[in-house]
Amino acid sequence: MKAAIMGYGTIGSGVAEVLRVNRDVIAKRVGEPIDVKYILDLREFPGDPEAGKLVNDVNVIVNDPEVKLVVETMGGVHPAYEFVRANLEAGKSVTTSNKALVADMGAELIKVARENQVNFMFEASVGGGIPIIRILQTCLTGDVVEEITGIVNGTTNYMMTEMTENGSDFDDVLKDAQSKGFAEKDPTADIEGYDASRKIAILTSIVAGQTVDYQDIPTEGITHIDSQDIRYASKMGRKIKLLARMVKTGDTYCCRVAPYLLPSEHPLYPVDGVFNAVFVKGNMLGDSMYYGSGAGKLPTASAVVGDVVAMAKHEKRHIFVDWKDEKLELSDPSEQTNRYFVRANKVHIFPDAKIIPAGVDNETGFVTSLLSEKEMKEKTELLGKVFKIIRFA
Ligand code: HSE
């Protein structure tokens, strides 16, 4: 079978490498070999083993009936959306690693795939090499998923781990992460939580069967976390981690992305460095967790090629995906309840507060009882100066 790769950056070249290195084993699993016929990219790659396959017009791929499998690893929503759609309409199955495309256009592209009896797959869009999409779409379909809590951003998990283990400051850790290639030159999407927000929107959409708009998810990044917060956290025997959460609330779901204080008994507590993990609670299954490399060339390419193999094995047969292009109204986040860790200079507003002595001058660190977000907001207004509020997980 013939495949094409659109976008020959880190992930796209990883996909070509996985297909090349594992060609024989993949051929055995599919029943015939899968060869890359075209690579779409405007750049040149002299000396690259795939350089002879480069094309710069998407129509070469769209108009070639021999190509049945297409990989989209370009990133961004446009023109990735137009290119993916054109290939689906031409009767080719497409897989993508592009979470922005899936979060924005997932339901619509699934519909186009269904109308053309092909498949649109996106395993690598969440959790990199961790096959969390397939787990939710296939393995846990006998369960009602009651909660998903994920460490789904490697950059911020690396940064929080470094701050916890070495007591380093945020700015120094960010520079270190950038020099090691773990953080982008423009790290905004990671450190402000937007990347995690898109990922939990995708996971919630496939569990709910309807579209969650990531812009409806209250999202807080890690930019305000400092070394004193880390000091308080270790006094409490907890770690601060950026979590992407979804909890079933009646007929709908409540989502949030924020830094949380995780207790040592939580399965996500030991997940450190650039690793990702997704904790899933089912009403029959109980607790489960899926762990692995959430980013990087070959782990992400491995997930993409898993989709390529699935698409090759289901040529001309659309696999039903329950994700409608109908917006899901999430439940009111102000009704959510939590305990909160607070750093402020007045405690009396919280009569049940548990004081955390961490030797920080001119403030008191304390933990509240269980309060709704709304109650917490009202109390915070009375507090006057608040240095920090971090939720307990
Ligand atoms: N920037 C992302 C991360 C890459 O740090 O996890 C994988 O989506």
Image: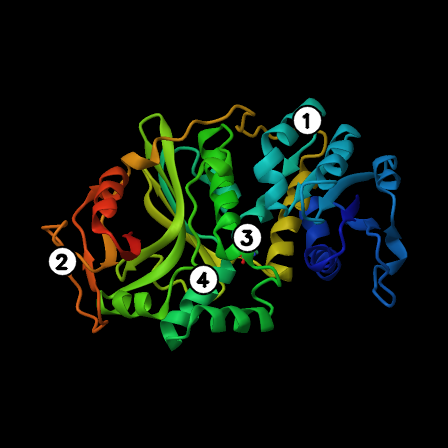
In this rendering, the answer to whether 375 lies above or below 75 is above
For the residue with label 4, is its CB less than 8 Å from the closest atom of ligand 1?
Answer: yes
Is 390 in front, or is 268?
Answer: 390
For label 1, the SS is: helix
- The residue at the point 40 percent across, 60 percent down is 224
Q: Which mark is residue 189?
A: 3
Residue 283 seen in this snapshot: no
The percent position of residue 215, horizontal first and vertical second, equals 50, 37
Circles 3 and 1 in contact, beta carbons < 8 Å: no
The residue under label 2 is 354
The residue under label 1 is 112
Closer to the chain start, of discs 1 and 4, is: 1
The residue under label 4 is 157
- The residue at the point 41 percent across, 41 percent down is 218
- The residue at the point 54 percent across, 25 percent down is 324
For label 4, the SS is: helix
- Kindly report which numbered mark, 1 or 4, lies closer to the viewer in this rendering: 4
Q: Give the position of the N terminus as an image quadrant.
A: top right
